[in-house]
Amino acid sequence: MNSLTQDYPAILLDKHEPPCLSLYQPTHRQHPENTQDPIRFRNLVKEMEESLRKKYPSRDITALLRPFEDLAEDRSFWNHTADGLAVLSAPGLFRVYRLQRPVVELSVVADSFHTKPLMRIVQSADRYQILGLSRHAFKMFEGNRDALDEIQLIESAAQVIDEQQGKDEGDREGAHRAYSSAGRPGAAARHGTDVKQDVEDRNTQLFFRAVDEVVLKHYSQPLGQRLILAALPQHHHLFRAISSNPLLMSEGINTNPEALSLDALRERAWQLVQPYYLERLAGLVESFGAAAAKGQGADDLSEIATAAIAGRIATLLIEADRLIPGYIDATSGQITTDNLSNPEIDDVLDDLGEHVLKTSGEVVIVPSERMPTQTGAAAIYRF
């Protein structure tokens, strides 16, 4: 299973050889509701095949759709679905994402990927990650207020331990010599139990440091989500002492995550995240108000579109679940309204978000009740 955290936006917003195939559908976590999911998936693949034959009649349609057909036959996959599914494919690329929120059923064949539903998920302000940690193992979870799922690790605990042992082989030899100093004249005697405990503590510290490096590089830095530590109380102090992760929250869950159900872990995590989530939204709204008062912000969509094309937007707030059918001219920034029932017609707000992300701006999806404007968007300019 691919990681949306790792792929968005760098891979999915990049240019790819057409045809680019995008498939979205709501899915179900439980039986018997999930028995209909593969049927709906096959129907969407058939729609995709019809579009391919019209737009790319000279291409090998069978080869382009083979990964979709293989996925349709994967019973194990369909028995472990989440709330939504996204499948993106192009020559040399095939990505499958289980989503924590439902999406509208849709299949699109075009020269670029249709990534709007993914932006709505990835850029939501309520997302967080959990590091479940013990002396010899770790797990990663990703969630929001409504759902929590375990992330497939890029590096397993065994790989992390092996890599760290290689890095610190010299240090371990030095440590062994230090532990064996009891035979020297004048050296204090060390009991075998004490020496063993020293070695275990050192190994734990080395493992925690390696885990911290992996989590920071592969999970925290790509999207900047808050990180919650879930571990036994005695492990919190040691991990926090060695961690260099600026996204690690000072509050944590003082229990082994294995002792909690996934839903109980989500509830404990959201209790910690919610105050920061509300504080962040309030800060963004206040920043927009201050910027707009100085002429450094706007809520007019045409003005925002022009600024987005020029790369002037530092932060863009988009109203969650708001749709404005149409598209933006990539050269002039002019907005043309249209009918969203046509799957090739974009949503203006999502187009704005993609342009801002491509110019290294920040996009935040905001609940409608906390949105500071009536237009569906609020922009804070860089200059």
Image (cartoon, rainbow, N blue to C red):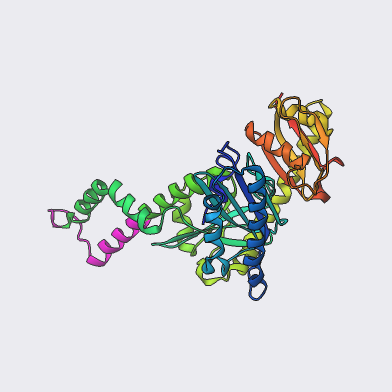
Residue 74: image location, x then y, percent:
52, 65
Q: Nearer the viewer, residue 120 or 221?
A: 120
Residue 189 is inside the magenta segment: yes
Q: Which residue is drawn at 56% across and 39% down?
A: 10
Q: Which residue is drawn at 47% across and 44% down?
A: 217
Q: Quadrant of residue 338?
A: top right
**What quarter of the picture does the C terminus occupy?**
top right
Q: Is residue 351 shown left or right of residue 91?
A: right
Residue 345 is inside the magenta segment: no
Q: Which residue is drawn at 54% across and 64% down?
A: 254
Q: What stretch is highlighted in magenta?
A: 183-204
Q: Is the magenta stretch mostly helix, strand or loop?
A: helix
Q: Which of 380 and 22 is in front in this view?
A: 22
Q: Is residue 356 shown left or right of residue 265?
A: right
Q: Which of 102 and 376 is in front in this view?
A: 102
Q: In which quarter of the image is residue 285?
A: top right
Above or below, 213 relative to 180:
above
Q: Is residue 301 shown left or right of residue 6?
A: right
